[in-house]
Each structure stands twice: as structure tokens, then as C-alpha cells.
Image: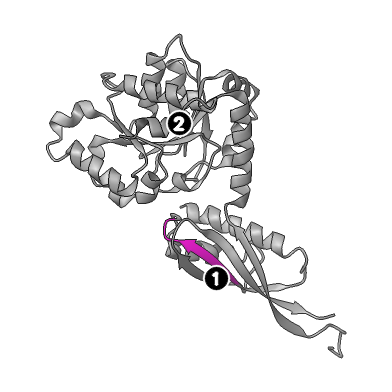
Amino acid sequence: MCEVCGCGDTRRVSIDVHASLLERNDREAAHLREHFVADGVLTLNLMGSPGSGKTALIEATARALAGRWRLAAVSGDLATALDAERLARAGVFALPITTGSACHLDASMVHHALHDEQLQREVERADVFFIENVGNLVCPAIYDLGQASNIVVLSVTEGVDKPLKYPLMFHKADLVVLTKIDLLPHLPGVSLAELRANLTRVTPRAAVLELSSTTASGVTGFVRWLETARGSLHGRHDPIASERP
Amino acid sequence: MHEVSLVHALFDQVDRALVPHPAAAVLQLTVRVGTMAGVECDLFRTAFEVTKSERGYPVADLQLVTSEGLDLILERLELEVRDV
């Protein structure tokens, strides 16, 4: 005991914690997932590089499903509401999530966006709710957002090596959508066979689709995938298994 | 750089773990990082060093242990506690 102030001696103590750094995010994501499942809405986390064609894919989906399905979306970007405005013009109810300096969306950002009453109503009535993540092939893969499936959008203009360079993103994918295939004639160094082989090395379980949002070639296949995935919400079908060879 | 977000999440866990030890000083944190966790260890260390004082742990040292898989786990804390 210290004779000056009466304080005790110090000692070193070790305590085991064993807690995930993502525990809070995962808890919030589980809460979101409960709501999405209860509402019967297929929620998809759409990830990919800036310019890979995430927004264009939602636009093409809206054109293909016009008058049949209701779509809702949030679009994550560091600045501007440009993507959400594009989607609104395509007939999709969409709100921006402006992240400032954050390079990814997390569950609390999606939760906060859903405090918007109109978005909440639209998501409850929607068939598909797209969470368009911030354009980035690294960070978004880490955070669960309560989605039913992860979709990674990869444009053929990005080259065939991206799956090998960013394995975590593709490892987490349930579906990989190869976009801008109308540009293949102008890309002599890009082989779809090589790209698919590289994908298989890092994500053997993911389905792979090829399409062009500009020409609509292949969009029907994506719509079929959505229909199957939506059916699986009600226990009818496994969307991933149905796409496996 | 998502490592900054993860370091804040780490200190949130430390805050919770210290509730039974309010007067303790944190000397060392041991964190397990999986090779597929999407975390760059050097960036994580940098984020830790620039954040620890503002989060109230100025003398804390970070020990990173790597493992296979997706782990991002606060394993253990070394504390200095004062007997009263």
C-alpha cells in the first residue's frame, strides 16, 4: 500500500476476450435480415469496382422487369446522389447513402437509410431490394449487410486477372456477373474462358453469368437467376445450386 | 481504408471488456487476423497507432497473430490494475 495517498500496488492481469471485431455489425445485419425475410423481399448486396456496371445492371433489370416486379435500391457512394438519380429515372425507388470518406457500406448505414419511411415502405412492397455498395473490390466484402446473396459485378474491360488479385471479394460471391460483353470484340487480350478459369480458382461455388446491360444480351439469364433466388426465399429452390454445372 | 473502421470496432470491444475493470490501463491487445479477412496488417497497425490515444488507450501495444480463414478476433488483453 502506498503510504502517501493510500493507493494499492499495481499488478499485471491477463483477460481472455475472444470477441469478433465485426460482432456489432453482424448483429445489426442479422436484425436487417430478419426484416427482409419477414417482408419476403430478395435483398442483394451488389459489389464491384467503380465503373464495373452495377448501376447499369439495375437499370437493365428494371427495363426487363417493367410492369412485373417492384424494385427498390440504395446506392452507396463517397459523394453525390448520381446513381440513385439514375435509378429513379429507370423507375426504381432509390435513395443514396453518402459515405463521406468510408470505402464501404456497413449494416448500420443500411439500417439508418431504412429509417426513411418512404424507403422502408418501398422495400416492404418490393420484390427485390438492391444494396449497391461503394465501388471497391476490397472493403465491401468484409461487411454483412443482411443480404440474401452477394453479387459481384466484374466488367470484361477490367481484365482477366481481377479474381486472382482480389480473391476475398470473389470468394464471398454467390453470383459473379460479367458485364460489358458487347465490348469483347475490342478487347483482344481478354478471354472469357481464361476469366472463368480464374474465377473457378477463387470461387468454385459461385454461379457466373455474362451479359451486356447496353444491348440487353444475357439480361434474361440474370432475371431467371433473380426469379430462382426469389423462389428460394419461400423454400422452393436453392439459387446457387440451380446455377452450378 | 476499412482498417480505421475495424480499429474503432476493436476499441469498442475493449471498452466493453473493461467494464469490470474501470481503473485498469491496457498494456497490450492480442488480435487474431485471418489471411482471408481482407485486412492489411501494416495498415491495421497504423490505424491502431493513430487512434489509440483518442480512444483512451495511449500506452496500449498491439500484438497481431495471423491464422487461416476469415478471423478478426480480439483474443486477449493485458491490463495493469491497481489494488485498493
Disc 1 residue type? Leu
Q: Is residue A181 above or below residue A49?
A: above
* Magenta region: B29-36
* Mark carried by residue A73: none
Do marks 1 and 2 share a subunit?
no
- Looking at the image, which residue is at 45% across and 45% down? A141
**Residue B74 as seen in the image, left or right of residue A178:** right
Q: Looking at this view, is A174 or B49 the one in front?
A: A174
Residue at the left extreme, as displayed: A188
Above or below residue A120? Residue A143 is below
Give residue A37's position: percent from left, percent from top: 59, 29
Name the chain letter of the residue that bears numbered label 1. Answer: B
Q: Say the numbered circle drawn on residue B62.
A: 1
> Residue A224, position in %: x, y?
38, 21
Residue situated in front as seen by the camera: B82 or A68: A68
Residue drawn at x 57%, y 70% as measured from the top left: B30
Residue that carries the numbered disc 2 in the rendered image: A238
- In this rendering, does residue A51 appear at all? no
Given the image, on which type of amino acid does mark 2 rest? Asp
